[in-house]
Image (cartoon, rainbow, N blue to C red):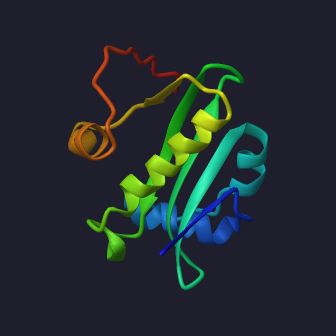
Amino acid sequence: MELRVRFPVDDEVLSALHSLAFDVPGEVQPWAARLERHALTWVGAFDNDELIGFVQVCWDGGAHAFVLDTAVHPDHGRKGIGSQLVARAADEARAAGCEWLHVDYEPHLASFYLDSCGFRPTDAGLLKLR
């Protein structure tokens, strides 16, 4: 397995991985354009040139960065790939001068982010817009 930072994104391939990892219907999304416009960085996990994992980091242009879309292909789960992706993303955010790395997650992912990735719980708020 190889981690690649800011790799050239194929919208169809990343959309398929996202669909499998999140168990949602697969519509092709404009990932490449979205990442170029909004992301500080992104990291892919590749096995023989097949994309098997992904994470992106968005930021405020200053001290705060945000982990989004951590995804691992179900056939490659429970092997530490997700935590390696997040660690590499954290290294990239740190190198860019960020002081804080935030993440939101659903309750069933708490162990992954808190235990495997080293985040600590904080109070936060959420406003549903749609």
Q: Residue furthest front?
A: 95
x 68%, y 55%: residue: 31
Whether residue 128 is visible, yes or no, is yes
- Residue closer to the observer: 72 or 65: 65
- Residue closer to the observer: 1 or 50: 1
x 42%, y 56%: residue: 84
Q: Does residue 120 appear left or right of residue 129 in this picture?
A: left
x 66%, y 23%: residue: 60
Q: Residue 99 in the image: state x and y as whole percent.
A: 55, 22
Does residue 83 lie above or below 48 as drawn?
Answer: above
Which quadrant of the view contains residue 125? top left
Total label count?
0
Q: Residue 40 in the image: state x and y as whole percent.
A: 68, 39
Does residue 90 lie above or below 26 as drawn?
Answer: above
Whether residue 30 is visible, yes or no, is no
- Residue closer to the observer: 72 or 114: 114
x 54%, y 43%: residue: 91
Q: Residue 62 in the image: state x and y as whole percent.
A: 68, 20
Q: Residue furthest bottom?
A: 48
Which quadrant of the view contains residue 74? bottom left
Q: Does residue 38 appear left or right of residue 79 in this picture?
A: right
Does residue 95 lie above or below 85 as drawn?
Answer: above
Q: Residue 61 in the image: state x and y as whole percent.
A: 72, 24
